[in-house]
Image (tube, grey):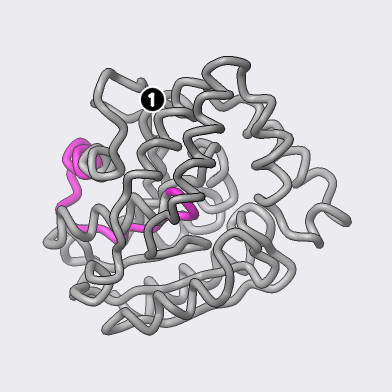
Amino acid sequence: MQLYTRSTGTGVPVVLLHAFPLSSAMWLAQREGLAATCRVITPDLRGFGGSQLGDDEPSIDLMADDVAAVLDSEGVERAVIGGQSMGGYVTMAFCRRHPDRVAGVVLADTKAGQDTDQARQNRERIARQVEADGTGVLIEEVLPGLVGTTTRERRAMVYGRVRGLVQSAPPGAVAWAQRAMAGRPDSFDTLGALKAPALVIVGAEDRLTTCDDAEEMLRALPEGQLTIIERAGHLSAVEQPEAFNAAVAAFVSSELGEAARSHG
């Protein structure tokens, strides 16, 4: 599976994996704002954006292996692997399956625990509804939780952009990704075994993966730091891109420095 990928910049390779049900289009401000400090690699996860879905069974592990193939195609041995929301789940799976390729980790607005039975049932319900009726249910049920109160009330253009990205999600990819996320394992042991520095980011207004979830991941990490982004919800990278970029740039330059650059 060859993922469609947008890349920009030079320096430490930083892979950013998008949230559900968006695409790498959400990382526009990161490709622009981080290109001066690192090499930003933003794939469309399978089925989303310009990437094909394929015939494989739904699996977060498979999505992580797709990302390893992206590194191969980009000629990158080790990279900072980062993800927001669903991209964070894929990041943790990547750490589990390809630990030797991880120079650092960014976990944004995500959580390490697996789904509850109720959450799994809800994902399956949405998957079936999307397969039957299209993505309207995402606008009704998923979109409201993706951004914080500040964005919804004061940043109409940002909210409109997120709505457009949600509306353009292919139904087949949405259903596949829901089932992949429902089947993902608990990742706290993965975080505990991490041998690379990690940055945890969370929007202060995130109601889906809360500050408590972020702090729980931080406690599990051998070497982690936490950035809370004010006036942002679940899509902190889209809602407050300057603050998000500043946190990632500082992490890359301070934690990785020359060591990671020599592996570029």
| Residue drawn at 29 percent across, 63 percent down | 187
134, above or below 164, in the image: above
Give coordinates of residue 45: x percent, y percent. 38, 36
Residue 35 in the figure: left or right of residue 252: right
In the image shown, does 50 or 110 lie closer to the viewer? Answer: 110
* Among the 4 quarters of the image, the one containing residue 234: bottom right
Residue 161 in the figure: left or right of residue 121: right
* Among the 4 quarters of the image, the one containing residue 151: bottom right
In the image shown, does 31 or 164 lie closer to the viewer? Answer: 164
Of the 4 image quadrants, the one containing the N terminus is top left
Residue labelled with disc 1: 51
Q: Residues within 10 Å of mark 1 (few under 14, many from 20)?
A: some
Give coordinates of residue 154: x percent, y percent. 87, 56
Residue 25 in the figure: left or right of residue 155: left
* Among the 4 quarters of the image, the one containing residue 71: top left
Tally of numbered discs: 1
Give coordinates of residue 31: x percent, y percent. 50, 49
Amino acid under disc 1: Ser
Magenta residues, start to end: 68-86
